[in-house]
Image (cartoon, rainbow, N blue to C red):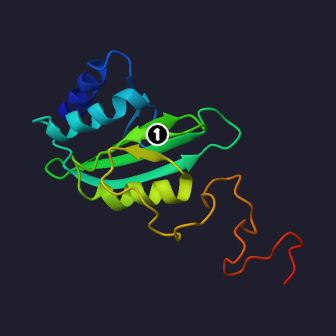
Amino acid sequence: MSAFAEALDALAAASGGAVRRLEDLRGEHAFSAQPEAGRDFLARLKDHPELRCDFLAVLTAVDNHLAEPRFEVVYIVRSLSANVDVRVNVPLPGEAPELATVTDLWPAADWMEREVYDMFGVRFAGHPNLTRILMWEGFEGHPLRKDYPLLGNSPGTPGHLGKGGKR
């Protein structure tokens, strides 16, 4: 096991069970963090002297419709000095999904969190400007949720077909 992997495992173990390593078939470093521990674990990854995961490459979400926890917010952070990626999945309930923002850790998270909010409805507490970024204000729903109607649900939207599905 590499020194990087050992440092990751020690950091996860220090969370008291709130962060655990996930099995990954490709040998990636992947972890699952409870919602209350996710932001702290990410901050520790960034500030750890050996790990220095200083680049937020991806912040997105997954909708596990019909399962609970319904959502997972997925972070991929990169240690530029070690040239290694670390994936952190944070599961969230389907009812009122919310996490703490990481915009203070990585300013690039601003638009990524807004996109996840807009498309999936996951709120980020403490975000400086959590508003829609892809859909217009007044748009109803979150289009990347798996239960979103295929024909849309907002009258007046381009391509909206109404109840009958005909133009």
Q: Residue at x 43, y 28 (%)?
A: 34
Which kind of residue does numbered mark 1 sit on? Glu
On the image, which quarter does residue 156 sit in? bottom right
Q: Is residue 99 left or right of residue 159?
A: left
User: On screen, 35 above or below 101?
Assistant: above
Q: Residue at x 74, y 61 (%)?
A: 149
User: On screen, 20 above or below 88?
Assistant: above
Tag count in the figure?
1
Quadrant of image for the C terminus: bottom right
User: On screen, 53 above or below 118?
Assistant: above
Q: Is residue 128 left or right of residue 82?
A: right
* Residue in the foreground of this view, choosing between 17 and 144: 144
Residue 27 visible in the displayed image: no
Q: Is residue 152 left or right of residue 106?
A: right
Q: Residue furthest left?
A: 49
**Mark 1 residue element:** strand
Residue 158: x and y in percent read 67, 81
Residue 53: x and y in percent read 21, 45
Q: Which residue is mark 1?
A: 98
Residue 52: x and y in percent read 15, 42
Q: Residue at x 26, y 18 (%)?
A: 14
Badge 1 crowding class, 10 Å Cα cut-off, few under 14, some 14 to 19, many 20 or more, is: some
User: On screen, 64 above or below 133?
Assistant: above
On the image, which quarter does residue 65 sit in? top right
* Residue in the foreground of this view, choosing between 93 and 26: 93
Residue 126: x and y in percent read 32, 44
